[in-house]
């Protein structure tokens, strides 16, 4: 009779250790990229904007660890410098979406009635169209560049946060401690801020981590199409587009920025899944 509980306990402990390792791998990847972004100017071996046409399209070597591009610029320096653009923009875009979505989701979930219906139908209307098509349309109308990208995320990225928070708020407001808080005579705003939101925001926190990566991918996609960060500013999506004509002969031009996006995406994915598991547990 004691063997089964012991086996379950051992299996549970192993799963917890595995989740901890996965979490630390994700944290390590994200921290490394963050440090590269912060310390970029001190770590880049060359000026990421400096052109040396005599050294154009050089293969990876001791002088240029990731080779050079069609204008003789050091690819490693540009990959590191691009992290100083993509990471802050991805974080800013996700924060804007989370802020707008949390406010609207809180209002709709806590007040309810016609306000909730209006906000959710507005979200349904936006989600009825392909997201990338709407982002491209907004950026095209407002003009390519960083401000247009951030505005696009504010207008389109709030919906998942609003829906997550609304659902959690509607669940939490039926708990007994919320009824007790209301009976104590405190204001509805204090009930929302002190008792409802702290217990309803957990799913949004896990989604926020993943949304940073989605924002970076969207930014890279727009830059690849020429609608995002404009040259000569280093940006991973722009670097992939610039290296595409040389894909069969100079693979490192696309492999370096594409690999950076893939590795960072893996870090955020592992971190987000681990965080979601911890918050749910």
Image (cartoon, helix red, strand yellow):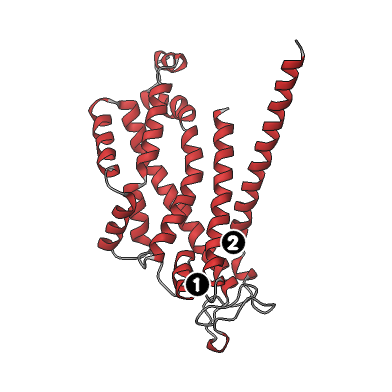
Label 2 CA crowd tier, 10 Å (few <14, some 14–19, many 20+): some
Which residue is outermost to the front? 248
What is the distance, in whole Å, between disc 2 and disc 1 at their CAs? 30 Å
Quadrant for residue 15, please give it.
top right
Nearer-N-terminus badge (2/1): 2
> In the rendering, at what x and y percent does residue 95 appear?
44, 47
Q: Secondary structure at mark 1?
A: loop
Mark 1 lies on residue: 247
Q: Nearer the viewer, residue 176 or 270?
A: 270
Label 1 CA crowd tier, 10 Å (few <14, some 14–19, many 20+): some
> In the rendering, at what x and y percent does residue 187 appear?
37, 23
Tally the numbered discs: 2
Q: Nearer the viewer, residue 53 or 40?
A: 53
Q: Nearer the viewer, residue 10 or 108?
A: 10
Residue 102 visible from this viewpoint: no
Mark 2 lies on residue: 38
Is residue 190 rendered to the left or right of residue 47?
A: left
Q: Is residue 112 positioned above or below 120 on the image?
A: above
Residue at x-position 54% and y-position 29%: 280
Q: Is residue 275 positioned above or below 222 on the image?
A: above
């Amino acid at each position: 009779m004691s063997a089964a509980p012991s086996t379950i306990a051992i299996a549970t402990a192993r799963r917890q250790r595995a989740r901890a390792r996965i979490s630390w791998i994700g944290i390590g990847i994200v921290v490394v990229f963050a440090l590269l972004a912060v310390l970029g100017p001190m770590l880049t071996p060359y000026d990421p904007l400096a052109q040396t046409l005599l050294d154009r399209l050089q293969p990876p070597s001791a002088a240029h660890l990731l080779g050079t591009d069609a204008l003789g610029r050091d690819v490693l320096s540009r990959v590191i410098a691009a992290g100083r653009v993509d990471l802050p923009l991805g974080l800013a875009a996700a924060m804007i979406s989370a802020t707008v979505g949390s406010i609207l989701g809180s209002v709709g979930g806590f007040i309810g009635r016609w306000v909730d219906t209006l906000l959710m139908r507005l979200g349904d209307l936006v989600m009825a169209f392909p997201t990338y098509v709407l982002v491209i349309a907004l950026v095209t109308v407002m003009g390519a560049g960083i401000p247009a990208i951030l505005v696009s995320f504010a207008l389109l990225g709030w919906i998942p946060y609003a829906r997550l928070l609304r659902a959690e708020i509607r669940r939490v407001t039926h708990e007994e401690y919320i009824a007790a808080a209301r009976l104590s005579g405190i204001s509805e705003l204090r009930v929302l801020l002190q008792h409802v939101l702290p217990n309803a925001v957990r799913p949004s926190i896990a989604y926020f981590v993943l949304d940073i990566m989605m924002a970076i991918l969207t930014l890279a996609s727009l830059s690849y199409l020429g609608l995002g960060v404009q040259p000569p500013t280093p940006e991973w999506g722009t670097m992939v587009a610039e290296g595409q004509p040389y894909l069969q002969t100079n693979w490192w031009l696309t492999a370096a920025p594409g690999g950076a996006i893939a590795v960072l995406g893996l870090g955020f994915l592992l971190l987000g899944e681990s965080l979601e598991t911890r918050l749910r547990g």
